[in-house]
Image (cartoon, helix red, strand yellow):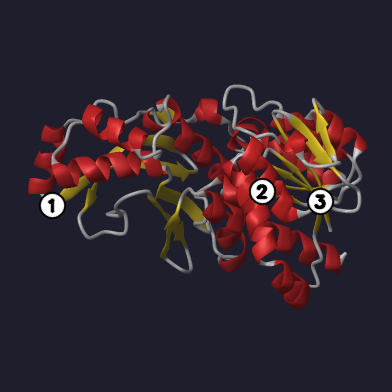
Amino acid sequence: MKLCILGFGAVGMGVVKVLSMKNDMLIDKYGLDISVVAVTDRSGAAVNPEGLDLQLLIETKENTNKISDYPEYGVPGLDSAEVVETVEFDCLVEVTPTNIDHGEPANTHMMETLKKGRDVVTSNKGPLSLYFSELVETANSNNAEFKYEASVGGAMPIINFAHNNLAGNNISSVLGILNGTTNYILSRMANEGSSYEQTLKEAQELGIAETDPTQDVEGIDAAAKIVILANSVLNRNVTIKDVHMEGITNITPESIELAKKEGFLIKLIGEASNNNLEVAPRLVKEGSPFAVDGTLNVATVMTDLADDVTVVGKGAGSIETASAILSDIICVKKSRNQD
């Protein structure tokens, strides 16, 4: 399988590291011989139809921060759109930075690839929260595989879990903590009695929160994931504009302490159901599945046959997210074997 990787930040590098680590296992267990034929970042691209050296890709990025400096095959200024148009590959791994406002350029990258009947694996929430139905329809009409497990919950299995392990169940709703940054902030506030501002600064210093934390703390990131779950798991047709959002910026140490006295914690909870799309702070019982600390994500799927099923996992991290991308690549391989 020839892969084209668009975006070579933390997640893209994680994918290459995981492919390098698991190369022999992928061949032995799945008959999956992967070659990475193109990689892009803001500097340009590295392209070799015979396959790029995975270790050299990582070293080039770590040493110069420019994938276009890759020896012999680096091409400064070659953008992702041109790579999609001109390079021969089987599967696109789209991990460029997320744009919640308009989903570009990732949406165009994926659409153009799917139109050619090529498979797409992505962690990119932006296009999925805005153009989910269009992407799925384009994939279906062109006999292409479209996988996006890594777009919700990082390493926490939820989308494929709902489709495969809970097949046959009627799923009525999904409820979860879907943003690790806000969970870290609220956990620290509960454990230390610190203020929101103080805890946010600490999270930024640790690299858990972005310099501009708006998408996390205002609930936008979690809302995008709720849209993906609503569309994928509940077969709704909604966008991020349909989600009621309330963030955590107004949560005070006093309100957290008051909740604790009653045996509750305050968590940013997302809900996707047939009559509700919401992200907002809610009270959860101490000791419940939602009483997770740090950057963990958790989701409970409400079903008719299996009752409530809860999954927990790391919601971020380059290797963790790459593990979900790798599982999707393996799913694509299995599906193609059945064709």
Instruction: Give the mark nearest the N terminus, 2 or 3.
Output: 3
Q: Is residue 103 left or right of residue 37?
A: left
Q: Give me the disc on residue 58.
A: 2
Q: Position of residue 204 (x, y in %)?
A: 36, 33
Report the residue that reaches farthest toward the bottom.
Answer: 28
Mark 3 burial class by Cα count in 10 Å: few <14, some 14-19, many 20+:
some
Q: Foreground residue, 7 or 280?
A: 7
Which image quarter is the C terminus in?
bottom right
Secondary structure of residue under mark 2: helix
- For residue 268, say whether it is visible: no
Disc 3/disc 1 C-alpha distance (Å)? 55 Å
Q: Nearer the viewer, mark 3 or mark 1?
A: 3
Disc 1/disc 2 C-alpha distance (Å)? 48 Å
Q: Position of residue 303 (x, y in %)?
A: 47, 61
- At a point 20% along the width and 40% down the height, the residue shown is 189
- For residue 204, say whether it is visible: yes
- At a point 47% along the width and 63% down the height, the residue shown is 304
Q: Which residue is mark 3?
A: 52
- At a point 16% along the width and 36% down the height, the residue shown is 194
Instruction: Give the mark nearest the N terminus, 1 or 2.
Output: 2
> What amino acid is at disc 3?
Leu
Q: Which residue is mark 1?
A: 263
> What amino acid is at disc 1?
Gly
Secondary structure of residue under mark 3: loop
- Disc 3, disc 1: CB below 8 Å? no
- At a point 91% along the width and 45% down the height, the residue shown is 88
Q: Give me the disc on residue 78.
A: none
